[in-house]
Image (spheres, rainbow, N blue to C red):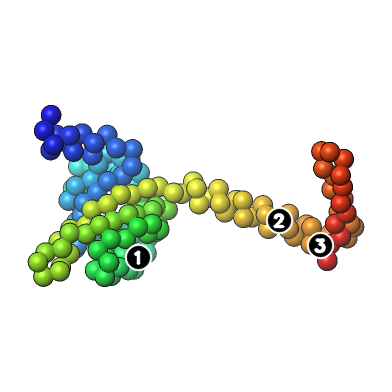
Amino acid sequence: MNSEAEYRMIFEKAMVGIFRSSADGRVLDINPASARILGFDSPEEIVRTIEDIGSQLYVNPEDRAKLLRLLDEESMVEGFETRLYKKDRSIIRVLLNIDCVKDEKGRIVWLEGTLQDITKTREAEEALRQAEEKYRNIYENALEGIFQTTPDGGSSVQIPP
């Protein structure tokens, strides 16, 4: 198997979204995992229907502009979190890791990177934050002292402030 065929097989079978786009916002190549993450039936459908990533996929198009500014300065951005629209216009949170290819004058020719859906992770973190806040509020506003025992029989009394 030649290196191009090996690359294509990895690209097609990867569990993480992989993409290549132009600096002006056209999708040049995208793998099936990206299509699935974004709710499209196929990579070809995305290439055909998305003409401007910034206005069609980004919930906040300014995030795309910010990403391009960062790439212009650094050439690589890791862990860029943003919200994107899926095909059905539902919103997901994603983590982008992007490298850019520049021409001899330093202009961005294309972007390539990975796309990871972190929606469920962020929702779980928010649920945990809300639960912690709820129980902290109960503790801090309790009218009685709170008594806690340990499995070995130790105990401590905690009195709310």
Residue extending furthest top?
Answer: 1
User: Given the image, on which type of amino acid does mark 2 rest?
Assistant: Lys
Disc on the earlier residue, 2 or 3: 2
Relative side of 134 to 108, left or right: right
Query: Is residue 87 among the parts visible in the rendering?
Result: no
Image point 86% across, 51% down: which residue? 156
Residue with the mark numbered 2: 134
Residue with the mark numbered 1: 63
The front one of 113 and 88 is: 113
- Residue 35's spot in the image, x, y percent? 29, 42
Tell me: residue 39, above or below residue 61. above
Q: Quadrant of the C terminus?
A: bottom right
Image point 87% across, 40% down: which residue? 153
- Residue 129's spot in the image, x, y percent? 62, 55
Structural distance between the alpha carbons of marks 2 and 3: 11 Å
Crowd around label 3: few <14 · some 14–19 · many ≥20 (10 Å): few
Query: Is residue 29 among the parts visible in the rendering?
Result: yes
Residue with the mark numbered 3: 141
